[in-house]
Image (cartoon, coloured by chain):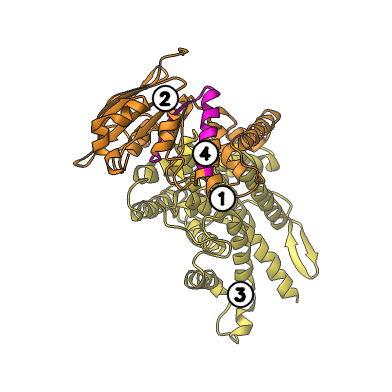
């Protein structure tokens, strides 16, 4: 494990669905400790890239390197083990589990107790279970959910559910936290506190990859930004430069009065 | 009144066996959205394995009580391997196939197991050795014997244990997470294949115990015994709300009571036209009624369409 340098490196990733090319020849690298933004119009391939990164899709061509290991077709639980955690554009919590249990599930990848532990309930298992619950409570507090921990996830407010997803992802002790439109549907106040939360998360040493439609959020938060359009990377760099890139303006920002 | 009490006792004992088997159906349905129609045969194989190992051990002079316990453990282990293999061979390759496909392989596995059992153990009824002194007790006019008491208490203990595993442990949490959203669970590092295998194995172990219970209670084992028992336990799972563990337990006990009270009174109600040999009618009458009027079962929620 190296201290600095690229945490994640995509090399010529392509993904086809039938005849449709959702991603073609996408290469990018994310440095340790940065907040990296991924923007692009609807259908540009952002979520597809996320799904490749987290093992839900297998890339048709190309490979990626994460924390020094090459992956061509990773299994989701293996990539979670390696330190990639994500949230979903449309929230995918375990609705009928409590807020606490949702976060406790996130600890799954870092804990061990199996069938025998479950059946015997020995001391090691009980201690582990206690540690899991404790860490989960901390994380709920960390992301700012102050409802009782036993509240079912489906009974939390929309903003809280988004935060709970982040807490659940953080529970896996990720090196890279990938967020798929975390500000979607949030009001200005909620977006502002999300921004603060992401800055705190980054300062704790976790690299953040962010898909977002809220250009203002991206520009104010990210160290570097890549722009996807029709499955291709059309620009990459610091927000200011990307914002003024003619190709980007034509593809994406052009529609807005900038 | 005595008849009433007697039928309640019988119903609770039979119902607790239904509940154990129903849990197997409902656990698999909860996680995979699949009805494992081979589950009834796992019950039968469990009974047969216990019967064979018991007979063998008695032949070697193993003390009866030890032989009973060992044969139960063997039946459980055998059924766990069987349950694991069924999932691996018949369901996992079809995980992403249309839902009808695994239903058909389930029926196929069921037929294969029945025929296999017929080849190994023959077509005849086997008498299940009576090894424990089976004293009878009279409670308020109803007669209950030791085996029935053991069955009922053991079944309740197993169900309580299962609830602890599902609601209080890391494994149980993973099972519930997989049941809700497989993709999201994988991203939390849950190996869903492992969880699914363990689910099948837990369900099969309970089925094995249920098989031994039925055979011990009636003193009989037969290669065809799993079919009807499986259908009734499935009915119990549907009655309680398939996919819901508490529902399966409640449905099992209720179905046992309905059947037993129905059998006890059908003669009086129909003026002797139908006798207690129509007992089996009640389970399926319940199944049809539930499916028509409350398809989600007593404790079931409306099931959202899976993505």
Q: Is residue A213 magenta?
A: yes
Please report the bounds of the magenta region as a residue range.
Answer: A189-214
Instruction: Report the mark closest to the observer, 3 or 1.
Output: 1
Return the residue found at the far front: A258
Q: Is residue B103 magenta?
A: no
Q: CA distance from mark 3 to mark 4?
A: 65 Å
Do badges 2 and 4 share one subunit?
Answer: yes
Using the image, name the chain to which the residue with label 4 belongs. Answer: A
Question: Are the numbered discs 3 and 4 placed on the same chain, yes or no?
Answer: no
Horizontally, residue B27 falls left or right of residue B142, namely: left
What is the distance, in whole Å, between disc 3 and disc 1 at their CAs?
Answer: 49 Å
Of marks 1 and 4, the one in the foreground? 4
Element at label 4: helix
Label 4 environment density (alpha carbons within 10 Å; few <14, some 14–19, many ≥20): few
Q: Name the side, left or right, on which B209 lies relative to B141.
A: left
Q: Indicate which disc, 1 or 2, sits on the residue closer to the N terminus.
A: 1
Q: CA distance from mark 2 to mark 4?
A: 17 Å
Near mark 3 (Cα within 10 A), the count class, few <14, some 14-19 or many ≥20, is many
Among numbered discs 1 and 4, the one appearing first in the sequence: 1
| Residue annotated with mark 1 | A157
Q: Which residue is mark 2?
A: A223
The 10 Å Cα crowd at callout 1, few under 14, some 14 to 19, many 20 or more, is: few
Q: Can you tell which chain is drawn orange?
A: A
In the rendered image, residue B263, in percent from the top left (x then y), is placed at 61, 74
Chain B pictured colour? yellow
């Amino acid at each position: 494990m190296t201290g600095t340098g690229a945490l994640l490196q995509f090399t010529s990733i392509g993904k086809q669905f039938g005849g449709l090319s959702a991603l073609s020849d996408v290469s990018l690298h994310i440095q340790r400790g940065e907040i990296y933004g991924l923007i692009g119009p609807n259908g540009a391939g952002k979520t597809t890239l996320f799904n490749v990164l987290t093992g839900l899709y297998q890339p048709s061509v190309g490979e990626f390197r994460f924390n020094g290991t090459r992956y061509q077709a990773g299994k989701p639980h293996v990539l979670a083990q390696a330190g990639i955690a994500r949230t979903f554009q449309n929230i995918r919590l375990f609705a009928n589990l409590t807020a606490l249990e949702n976060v406790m599930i996130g600890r799954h990848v870092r804990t061990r107790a199996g069938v025998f532990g479950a059946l015997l309930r020995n001391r090691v298992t009980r201690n582990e279970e206690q540690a899991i619950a404790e860490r989960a409570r901390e994380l709920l507090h960390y992301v700012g959910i102050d409802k009782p921990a036993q509240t079912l996830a489906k009974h939390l407010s929309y903003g809280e559910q988004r935060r709970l997803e982040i807490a659940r992802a953080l529970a896996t002790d990720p090196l890279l936290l990938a967020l798929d439109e975390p500000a979607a549907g949030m009001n200005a106040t909620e977006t502002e506190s999300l921004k603060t939360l992401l800055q705190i998360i980054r300062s704790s040493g976790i690299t953040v990859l962010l898909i977002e439609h809220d250009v203002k959020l991206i520009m104010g938060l990210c160290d570097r930004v890549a722009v996807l359009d029709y499955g291709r990377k059309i620009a990459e760099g610091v927000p200011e430069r990307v914002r003024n890139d003619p190709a980007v303006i034509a593809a994406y920002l052009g529609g807005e009065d900038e | 009144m005595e008849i009433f009490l007697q039928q309640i006792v019988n119903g609770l004992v039979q119902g607790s066996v239904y509940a154990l088997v129903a849990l197997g159906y409902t656990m698999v349905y909860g996680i995979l959205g699949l009805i494992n129609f081979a589950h009834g045969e796992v019950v039968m194989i469990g009974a047969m394995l216990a019967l064979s190992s018991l007979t063998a051990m008695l032949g070697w002079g193993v003390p009866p009580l030890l032989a009973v316990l060992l044969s139960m453990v063997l039946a459980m282990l055998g059924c766990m391997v069987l349950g694991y293999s069924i999932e691996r061979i018949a369901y996992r390759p079809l995980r992403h196939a249309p839902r009808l496909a695994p239903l058909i392989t389930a029926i196929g596995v069921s037929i294969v197991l029945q025929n296999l059992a017929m080849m190994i153990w023959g077509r005849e009824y086997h008498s299940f050795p009576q090894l424990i002194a089976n004293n009878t007790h009279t409670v308020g006019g109803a007669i209950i014997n030791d085996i029935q008491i053991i069955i009922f208490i053991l079944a309740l203990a197993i169900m309580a244990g299962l609830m602890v595993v599902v609601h209080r442990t890391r494994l149980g949490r993973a099972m519930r997470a997989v049941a809700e959203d497989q993709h999201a669970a994988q991203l939390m590092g849950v190996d869903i294949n492992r969880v699914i295998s363990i689910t099948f194995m837990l369900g099969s172990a309970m089925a094995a115990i249920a098989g031994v219970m039925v055979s011990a209670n009636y003193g009989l084992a037969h290669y065809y015994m799993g079919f009807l028992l499986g259908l009734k336990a499935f009915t119990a799972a549907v009655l309680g709300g398939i996919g819901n563990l508490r529902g399966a337990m409640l449905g099992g006990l209720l179905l046992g009571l309905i059947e037993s009270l129905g059998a006890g009174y059908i003669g009086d109600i129909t003026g002797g036209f139908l006798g207690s040999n129509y007992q089996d009618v009640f389970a399926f009458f319940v199944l049809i009624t539930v499916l028509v009027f409350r398809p989600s079962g007593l404790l079931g929620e409306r099931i959202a369409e899976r993505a």
